[in-house]
Amino acid sequence: MTPSSDPVPAPRKKPFSMIRSFVAADFLTLGNGFCGGGSVLAAMQYLVTGESRWLVLAMALLPAALVFDFADGRVARWRRRSSALGADLDSLADVISFGLAPAALGFAVGLRGVFDVVILLYFVACGISRLARFNATADALSDESGKVKYFEGTPIPTSVLIVVLLAVLHFRGLLQGEVWLGAWHLGGAVLHPLTILYALSGSAMISTIHVPKI
């Protein structure tokens, strides 16, 4: 009989290190999320204090988030390095900066009727769905080099256009007192026509129109 040998222990799986897995592009993505989260908090502070500077800060942080969002992809391609967390980080940051934050701004400037809130929540849900669809279909939309050829539905960062409009209205004094375009009273509930822009933006995100990717 041959002496039995002890079983060789399986090599221990190295634990995943989140921080060590980060690359330069991921820190830019976090900058995007930082700006979006900061915008939400600044909008809340504006509601508490009524001080215009907080509203201006909340608005200014979202174009800054757009710069970070643009830069992270460029840096990843320039350095030819991406992390396992990169795509998920990007989607989560985008939901905050271009979904939740613009909705919070709309609420802060006076879009607080029942129908307004329903539309703002619809807008956020559309943003989440848009990003989930992109993540699920990115491989199918990619060419031979792995680059995505086009977006299906408008990209969620296009919501910054609504923020720009809100900024223009604010500086022209059209958000103080009665919100620009007034309000409709429907069955005891209120809808501000301005909120319809959020409904259109959200619907465009989940549409099937093709937008070439630059």
Image (tube, grey):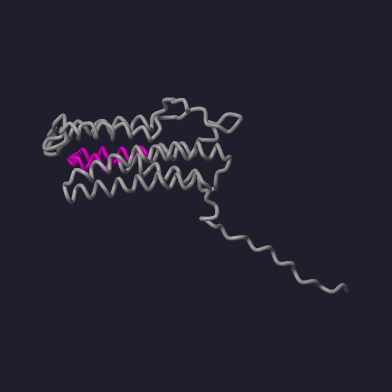
- Please state which of residues 189 and 76 is positioned toward the viewer in this rendering: 76
| Magenta stretch prevailing secondary structure | helix
Q: Which residues are magenta?
A: 102-127
Q: Position of residue 171 (x, y in %)?
A: 19, 34
Q: Position of residue 86 (x, y in %)?
A: 50, 45
- Please state which of residues 207 and 67 is positioned toward the viewer in this rendering: 67
Residue that protrudes farthest toward the right in the picture: 1
Q: Position of residue 46 (x, y in %)?
A: 20, 47
Per the image, is 116 magenta?
A: yes
Q: Position of residue 36 (x, y in %)?
A: 34, 45
The quadrant in which the N terminus is found is bottom right
Q: Quadrant of residue 125?
A: top left
Per the image, is 191 magenta?
A: no
Residue at x 57%, y 40% (from the top left corner): 79
Left or right: residue 80 compared with residue 51 = right
Residue at x 31%, y 43% (from the top left corner): 101
Left or right: residue 72 compared with residue 3 = left
Residue 93 vertical placement versus 9 (above, below): above
Residue 84 vertical placement versus 177 (above, below): below
Residue at x 46%, y 25% (from the top left corner): 212
Q: Quadrant of residue 211?
A: top left
